[in-house]
Amino acid sequence: MNDEEIEKFIEAGKIASRIREDSKRLIMVGEPLLEIAETVEQMIAEEGAKPAFPVNISINDIAAHYTPEFDCTKALSENDVVKTDIGVSIDGALADTAYTIDLSGKNETLVSAAKEALDAALSY
């Protein structure tokens, strides 16, 4: 891999990181999943990149990889644990990032475990 290719991966990672943090404000009770996904994908486009895959917004017992379809009317509720997975592509250089938000505030152990797992993975 040459330096130019490596730089594309680095840039994709920086964009994914910014969008991960900025998109957390979208995760609120009453927000439709489709609107959240479309907004995140628009944020990616505004950065000059493309989604590496459709935005995943998985709720509660759906562990991962749920993408709202074009006719999805589901909205977030006050008891949801929301897992959001975002991918960014720049000329085939991909970055993937995710986060979990507990809208109920009752599942701190689960959210903490997810964060600890991420921190452990990043420490390598």
Image: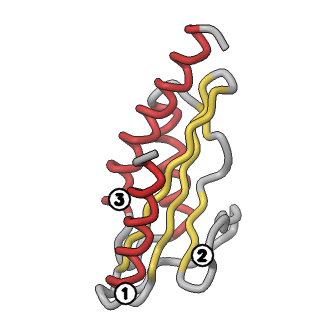
For this view, does 65 lie left or right of residue 41? right
Report the Cα–Cα distance between label 1 and label 2: 25 Å
Q: Quadrant of residue 71?
A: bottom right
Q: Amino acid at mark 3?
A: Lys
- Please give the residue where the numbered disc 3 appears in the rendered image: 24
Q: Is residue 81 above or below residue 14?
A: below
Residue at image position (46%, 45%) is: 124
Report the Cα–Cα distance between label 3 and label 2: 20 Å
Give residue 99's position: percent from left, percent from top: 44, 61
- Please give the residue where the numbered disc 1 appears in the rendered image: 107
Q: Decide: few, some or many residues near mark 1? Use Cα within 10 Å; few <14, some 14-19, many ≥20.
A: some
Say which element carries label 1: loop
Mark 1 or mark 2: which is in front? 1
Q: Amino acid at mark 2?
A: Thr
For this view, does 24 lie left or right of residue 34? left
Q: Are marks 3 and 2 in contact (CB under 8 Å)?
A: no
Q: Amino acid at mark 1?
A: Asn
Quarter of the N terminus within the rendering: top right
Give residue 78's position: percent from left, percent from top: 37, 87
Mark 3 or mark 2: which is in front? 3
> Seen from this angle, which residue lies furthest front?
124
Q: Is residue 113 above or below residue 48?
A: below
Q: Nearer the viewer, residue 75 or 105?
A: 105
Mark nearer the N terminus (3 vs 2): 3
Residue at image position (50%, 37%) is: 44
Instruction: Specify the label residue 73 is tagged with.
Output: 2
Say which element carries label 3: helix
Count every numbered label the image shows and give the total. Answer: 3
Report the Cα–Cα distance between label 3 and label 1: 17 Å
> Seen from this angle, which residue lies furthest top?
3
